[in-house]
Image (cartoon, rainbow, N blue to C red):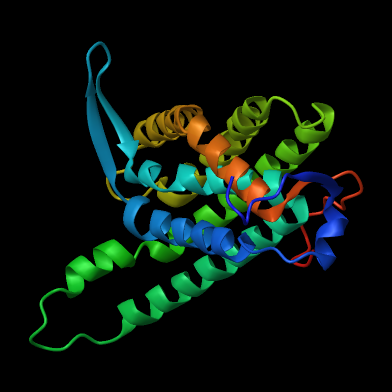
Amino acid sequence: MGDADQEPVKVEAQALRARPLRWFDFTMAAFVTVLLLSNVLGAGKVAVIQLPVVGEWPFGAGILFFPLAYVLGDVLTEVYGYARARRCIWAGIAAMLFMAFMATVVVALPPARDWGGQAAYERVFGQVPRIVFASITAFWAGEFANSFIMAKMKLWTRGRHLWSRTIGSTVVGQGIDSALFYPLAFLGAPGWTPQLVLTVMFTQWVLKVAWEVLLTPVTYAVIGFLKRREGVDVFDERTDFTPFRASV
């Protein structure tokens, strides 16, 4: 164990207000970065994998990014408590709103006469406002459900069986997220039939939960590292679980 490591001490979430947290800002920055990447790079493309029995299985490319946001959400709730996870969720929403606004402005700017990339640019970034609206709605509901269940299950299990909390909260949170996001973002969009929306929605939910299961060892390692470095193990015993606050 390094010199900076401390044995985690069980504390209530309110006790963190007077305690310096060395890694919280980095974790929040990683959380917001993953959210923005998932909306810009991954959300608008449908890729396909070839499975031995099923055949072609379409999936949204956002699967490469967005599940990591839920993993980081689990880390934030487990290490820093629901209130600080809530703060990060609102920071992510503010970042996505700003990105959507700037995408609208940049797409609307008149292109130079000798620049031939406007059509491609509009195709990629012109749909960002709708995707971000759907993403914010789905993410708000899904991530708060994920964080709430994670915090409550920690109390129910008295801090044991971390895997049950990370996977159980993801099953519910990602289910809500996928059920809201894909119809809001793509139903009626060019190339997106209702059948394709349903297929990708179900596929994404299954793959996101599978991602959570596969990343469980990584989640354990990150949570263990942060708890040792911060020296605390937070329990939300008297936490106000309303989502409508950005403060801790």
The image position of residue 202, as x and y in percent, is 45, 29
In this rendered view, identify the residue nearer to me: 124 or 230.
Answer: 230
In the rendered structure, the answer to whether residue 219 lies left or right of residue 247 reads: left
Residue 16, located in which quarter of the rendered image? bottom right
When asked about the image quadrant of residue 90, the answer is bottom right
Identified at 54% across, 38% down, the residue is 221
Q: Height in image: 248 above or below 78?
A: below
Q: Is residue 119 left or right of residue 212?
A: left
Nearest the viewer among 30 and 32 is 30
Identity of the residue drawn at 64% across and 28% down: 168
The number of discs equals 0
Q: Give the residue at x 59% y 54%.
A: 137
Q: Residue at x 24, y 33 (%)?
A: 48
User: As drawn, which residue projects farthest toward the left?
Assistant: 114
Q: Position of residue 19 (x, y in %)?
A: 79, 64
Residue 133 to residue 182: above or below: below
Tell me, yes or no, if residue 209 can be seen here.
Answer: yes
| Quadrant of the image containing the C terminus | bottom right
Residue 115 position within the rendered picture, expressed as x and y whole percent measured from the top left: 11, 82
Question: Compared with residue 46, is residue 208 higher up or lower down, i.e. above or below?
Answer: above
Quadrant the N terminus occupies: top right
Residue 144 visible in the picture = no
Give the image location of residue 186, x and y in percent: 40, 48
